[in-house]
Image (cartoon, grey):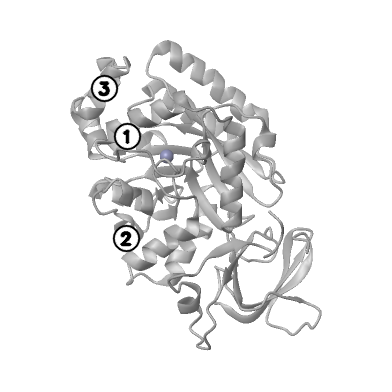
Amino acid sequence: MSVESGRFRARWVFPGDADPIENGLVEVGDGVIVGLSDKSDPDAVDLGNVALIPGLVNTHTHLEFSDLSEPIRPAEPFSSWIKSVVQHRRSRETQTPEVIKQGIDECRQNGTTLIGEIATEDHDSAVYADPRLSVVMFRELLGLTEQRAADQRQIAETHVARAPNEEASRLRRGLSPHTPYTVRRDLLDFASRLAQDERCPIAIHLAETEAERQLLSSGTGELSEMLQAFGEWDPANFEVGRRPLDFLHMLQDVDNVLVVHGNYLDDEEIEYLGNHPQMTVVYCPRTHHYFRRREHPWLRLLNAGASVCLGTDSRASNPDLNLWGEVQFLRRQFPQVASETLLRLATSSGAGALGLSARTGSITLGKMADLAVVRLPDVSHRDAYGLLLEPHSQATAFPPGLPS
Ligand SMILES: [Zn+2]
């Protein structure tokens, strides 16, 4: 069965931008959606009791940790978790390209067709090449000293110049200034301007912890102590009285900004994001839960008109890279939220966040045939979303049965 062309029948098709279609028929030609209907077609491949949904979009992960069998401990305090991550990175033996491929396979097998990846090394494009999914490779930038920042500017320029963000490419490039406290202000400014010039997206971890707010506002707390322990503390980088909003302002002219986590955004920041649709908050539900953060403001953000999408984050804080697991987690924790909303966050909102709505994120004529399959329970009732999000449903790659 080729994914490039064919006609596929499913019990339900969820286009994502329209009502579900019972006994839906999806026609694929040269990897593009060319037909969507419920017309009869005896020659179509009948996928059976499944739903076809838009391929899932995992907007935030770090694939370099894809070989971890369980999250890194301790989860708290956050500075101890970061130290353990750094230690793990220094001690591991596995070659990162193999681990990245392992992560891509895991994502694809669970129905993900677009990944926002934070890359800490300049891997060859071939590491990310997979004809069945797209990757936006955000090069991580880290630097508090002048010398380090100069090196990182070079790395950023080389990264975005390497392969233009051609329309046809399944690999695209972005920049990820790591956090407001691990990147000098001039480096962040540089990344912002470069992203504007090159029309590439930016991802930044922001408002992730209370400790971050404390560091920005007063230059004190566990993160300041951590930077001192790493020998990276320079009070000149931490003028007091700052907050995440200042960093949103610095990035407001970039086409697409992913505000990763946003766990501790305040009211004013939520309102600001509601007025800046080019910025999307990436909520990583199970990672948020792992760190036992304060209740995430995603519903307040949605109410304010802000964009929200989903990510798994890495296996350093999550048991797996299965984005459908995030959807199921939200279904359990927030039964009052409409299923349509959850599906949107997992698909079209993610595609929009990464600047790829015109190509993917919904089953729409002319978009790429980025699809996922959800096996449905053997019951006769016809509540489409109830079937789709029943507690044990699992998303898998399209078409089902293709060797991985
Ligand atoms: Zn992250």
Marks 1 and 2, Cα distance to the nearest angstrom?
A: 27 Å
As shown in the figure, which amino acid type bears the numbered disc 1?
Answer: Trp
Q: Is residue 258 left or right of residue 78?
A: right
Identify the element where label 1 is drawn: helix
The mark found on residue 81 in the picture is 1
Depth check, front residue: 153 or 90: 90
Q: Residue 212 at what x, y percent from top left?
A: 26, 34
Marks 1 and 2 in Cβ contact (< 8 Å): no
As shown in the figure, which amino acid type bears the numbered disc 2?
Answer: Leu
Q: What residue is drawn where x is 47% and y is 50%?
A: 320
Q: Which residue is mark 3?
A: 238
Q: Which residue is mark 2?
A: 299
Neighbours of disc 2 within 10 Å: few (<14), some (14-19), many (20+): few
Q: Is residue 401 left or right of residue 207?
A: right
Q: Is residue 120 left or right of residue 307?
A: right
As shown in the figure, which amino acid type bears the numbered disc 3?
Answer: Phe
Q: Is residue 199 visible?
A: no
Marks 3 and 2, Cα distance to the nearest angstrom?
A: 32 Å
Outermost residue on the right side: it is 43
Q: Residue 99 at what x, y percent from top left?
A: 57, 37
Q: Which quadrant of the view contains residue 89?
A: top left
Q: What residue is drawn where x is 46% and y is 25%?
A: 91
Q: Is mark 1 within 8 Å of ligand 1?
A: no
Q: Is residue 167 visible?
A: yes
Q: Quadrant of the N terminus?
A: bottom right
Depth check, front residue: 142 or 247: 142
Depth check, front residue: 216 or 247: 216
In the depicted structure, whether residue 372 falls above or below residue 70: below
